[in-house]
């Protein structure tokens, strides 16, 4: 995932957290809540962002959701990569 895509959904990739006896975990920071999170099993990045924002009481407006979806579509069209 590129920095452009991450910026479009409002997150920063922090890097990989090494875990003893387990695979490394990618960590992200949500620019809205300023919180760090990882993806749940089978969870998309946009799903994780929405989950984290709900945990902090940030309810996305229909405009926010529309913007995220529009950014996702533009990214997929530009790079030919499906993002979910």
Image (cartoon, rainbow, N blue to C red):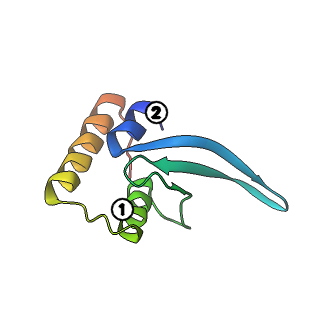
* Left or right for 47, reference 42: left
Q: Which mark is residue 42?
A: none
Label 2 environment density (alpha carbons within 10 Å; few <14, some 14–19, many ≥20): few
- Which element is circle 2 on? loop
Q: Which mark is residue 2?
A: 2
The residue nearer to you, when weighing 19 against 81, is 19
- Counting the numbered discs, the total is 2
* Left or right for 32, reference 66: right
Q: Position of residue 70 (x, y in %)?
A: 21, 44
Q: Position of residue 10 (x, y in %)?
A: 37, 44
Residue at x-position 41% and y-position 70% = 55
Work out whether 78 lies above or below 63: above
Residue at x-position 25% and y-position 36% = 74
Q: Which residue is mark 1?
A: 50
* Cα–Cα span, label 2 and label 1: 19 Å
Going from N to C along the chain, the mark reached first, 2 or 1, is 2
Q: Position of residue 26 (x, y in %)?
A: 61, 50
Q: Position of residue 61 (x, y in %)?
A: 18, 60
* Left or right for 39, reference 50: right
Label 1 environment density (alpha carbons within 10 Å; few <14, some 14–19, many ≥20): some
């Amino acid at each position: 995932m590129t920095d452009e895509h991450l910026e479009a959904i409002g997150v920063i990739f922090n890097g990989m957290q090494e875990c003893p006896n387990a695979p490394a975990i990618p960590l992200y920071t949500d620019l809205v809540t300023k919180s760090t999170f990882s993806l749940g099993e089978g969870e998309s990045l946009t799903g994780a962002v929405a989950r984290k924002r709900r945990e902090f009481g940030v309810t996305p407006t229909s405009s926010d959701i529309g913007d995220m979806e529009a950014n996702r579509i533009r990214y997929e069209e530009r790079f030919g990569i499906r993002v979910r």
